[in-house]
Image (tube, rainbow, N blue to C red):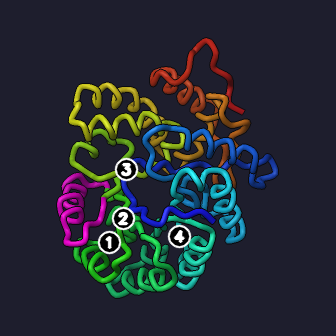
C-alpha cells in the first residue's frame, strides 16, 4: 500500500463525505468520484476519511477498512490519507490503528472516547494515546473537543500528551474558544518538538487562520476545498484583501452548513454536492435523517451567493 512516510500533518486537509445507496450500503462508484473531485484541488496536504464527515459512527470495522482501501486505491498515490480512530475503548482504538497502518494511512486522527463525557483524568488520556502509539508509529492528530463536552483535554493534560507521546504531531482544534485557540497555536507550535494546530473552526475560519494555525482540517472541504486552500494561501501570504474576499464567499456556506442542529452539518454538505451535480443522492444513515425541502432551498441559495452555482442551471437535490 502506498504511504507518504515523511508526512507531518499540516496545511489544508479536507475531510470527505461517504455516499450511500438508497439501501444504506456504501456507494463505491460515487465515493471514488468524490475522492477524485476533492483530490484534484490544488494546494491540499492530505485527505481525511473515517471521520465525522464519513459518518464513521455508523460504519462497522470492515466498512472502515473498505473506505480506507478505496481511498488508497483511488488517491493514495497522490495524497497522504489521514484515517480517523473512532472507538470508545482503547483496545479497539489500537486495533483500528493497526488496520489503518497496514492499509497505508499516513496519519491518524484520534477522536476522544465517549466515556470521557462522564469525566476524565490525565492518566486516562495518556493511557488511551499510549495504547494507540504502541500499536503504530504513524503520526497522531489529537482531536481537541470543547472542554464543556467533557471530551476536550485541559491545557495541562494536552501538554502531558505532547510530551509523553512523541508521535503526536498535530491537534485538530475544535476548542470553540478564541483565547484558548490562541493558546494552542502559540504554545503547541513552539514546543521543542512542535505540534501543529489544524483549525476546524470552519464557521469562523478567516478569523481562526489569522491567529496562525499551521493548517486546517474541515468537513466543509468536501464541498469548498478550493476556497479553503485559496484562503489559507492568502492568509499565509499576508494578502488580507484577497483573504477577506474569499472569506466573504465562504460565509454563506458556513452559515448553512453549521446551523442548528449542528449534527446535520455533513448531511447538508451532501445536499450541496447533489445540487452541484457532484453526487447522485444525499442519503444518510440513521439516526441522521434527510433534511427538509426548505433547508435544501437555503443551501441552494448559499451556493449561488458563494458563486459556486448558477441560479439558472441549478438542479434540485434528491
Of callouts 1 and 2, which one flags the residue occurring earlier in the amino acid sequence? 2
Give coordinates of residue 273: x percent, y percent.
61, 35
Q: Are marks 1 and 2 in contact (CB under 8 Å)?
A: yes
Give the numbered dot on residue 153. 1
Give coordinates of residue 77: x percent, y percent.
59, 54
Give coordinates of residue 313: x percent, y percent.
64, 15
Give the numbered dot on residue 172. none
Give the numbered dot on residue 85. 4
Give the numbered dot on residue 144. 2
Which of the 4 quarters of the picture holds residue 145?
Answer: bottom left
Q: Nearer the viewer, residue 28 or 298?
A: 28
> Which is closer to the viewer, label 1 or label 4?
4
Give coordinates of residue 226: x percent, y percent.
46, 35
Q: Residues within 10 Å of mark 4 (few under 14, many from 20)?
A: many
Q: Secondary structure at mark 2?
A: strand
Instruction: Write the residue at 23% across / 52% down.
Output: 178
Q: Are marks 1 and 3 in contact (CB under 8 Å)?
A: no
Of callouts 2 and 4, which one flags the residue occurring earlier in the amino acid sequence? 4
Span highlighted in magenta in the image: 176-196
Magenta-colored stretch includes residue 119: no
Magenta-colored stretch includes residue 192: yes
Instruction: Write the residue at 58% across / 34% down.
Output: 272
Looking at this rendering, what residue extends furthest in the right direction? Answer: 23
Instruction: Write the residue at 74% across / 54% down.
Output: 26
Q: Secondary structure at mark 3?
A: strand
Of callouts 4 and 3, which one flags the residue occurring earlier in the amino acid sequence? 3
List the residue tagged with mark 3: 11
Amino acid at each position: 500500500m502506498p504511504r507518504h512516510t515523511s508526512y507531518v500533518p499540516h496545511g489544508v486537509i479536507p475531510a470527505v463525505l461517504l455516499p450511500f445507496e438508497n439501501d444504506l450500503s456504501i456507494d463505491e462508484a460515487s465515493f471514488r468520484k468524490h475522492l477524485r473531485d476533492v483530490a484534484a484541488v490544488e494546494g491540499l496536504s492530505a485527505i481525511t476519511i473515517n471521520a465525522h464527515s464519513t459518518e464513521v459512527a455508523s460504519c462497522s470495522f470492515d466498512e472502515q477498512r473498505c473506505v480506507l482501501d478505496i481511498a488508497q486505491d483511488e488517491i493514495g498515490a497522490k495524497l497522504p490519507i489521514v484515517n480517523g480512530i473512532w472507538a470508545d475503548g482503547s483496545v479497539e482504538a489500537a486495533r483500528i490503528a493497526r488496520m489503518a497502518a497496514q492499509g497505508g494511512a499516513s496519519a491518524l486522527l484520534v477522536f476522544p472516547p465517549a466515556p470521557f463525557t462522564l469525566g476524565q483524568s490525565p492518566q486516562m488520556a495518556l493511557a488511551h494515546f499510549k495504547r494507540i502509539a504502541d500499536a503504530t508509529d504513524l503520526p497522531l492528530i489529537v482531536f481537541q473537543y470543547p472542554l464543556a463536552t467533557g471530551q476536550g483535554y485541559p491545557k495541562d493534560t494536552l501538554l502531558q500528551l505532547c510530551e509523553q507521546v512523541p508521535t503526536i504531531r498535530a491537534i485538530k482544534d475544535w476548542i470553540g474558544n478564541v483565547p484558548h485557540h490562541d493558546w494552542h497555536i502559540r504554545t503547541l507550535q513552539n514546543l521543542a518538538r512542535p505540534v501543529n494546530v489544524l483549525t476546524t473552526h470552519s464557521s469562523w475560519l478567516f478569523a481562526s487562520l489569522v491567529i496562525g494555525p499551521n493548517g486546517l482540517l474541515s468537513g466543509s472541504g468536501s464541498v469548498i476545498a478550493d476556497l479553503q486552500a485559496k484562503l489559507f494561501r492568502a492568509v499565509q501570504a499576508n494578502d488580507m484583501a484577497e483573504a477577506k474576499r474569499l472569506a466573504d464567499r465562504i460565509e454563506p456556506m458556513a452559515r448553512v452548513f453549521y446551523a442548528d442542529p449542528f449534527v446535520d452539518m455533513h448531511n447538508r454538505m451532501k445536499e450541496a454536492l447533489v445540487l452541484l451535480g457532484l453526487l447522485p443522492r444525499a442519503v444518510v444513515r440513521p439516526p441522521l435523517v434527510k433534511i427538509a425541502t426548505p433547508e435544501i432551498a437555503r443551501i441552494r441559495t448559499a451556493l449561488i451567493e458563494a458563486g459556486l452555482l448558477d441560479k439558472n442551471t441549478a438542479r434540485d437535490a434528491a
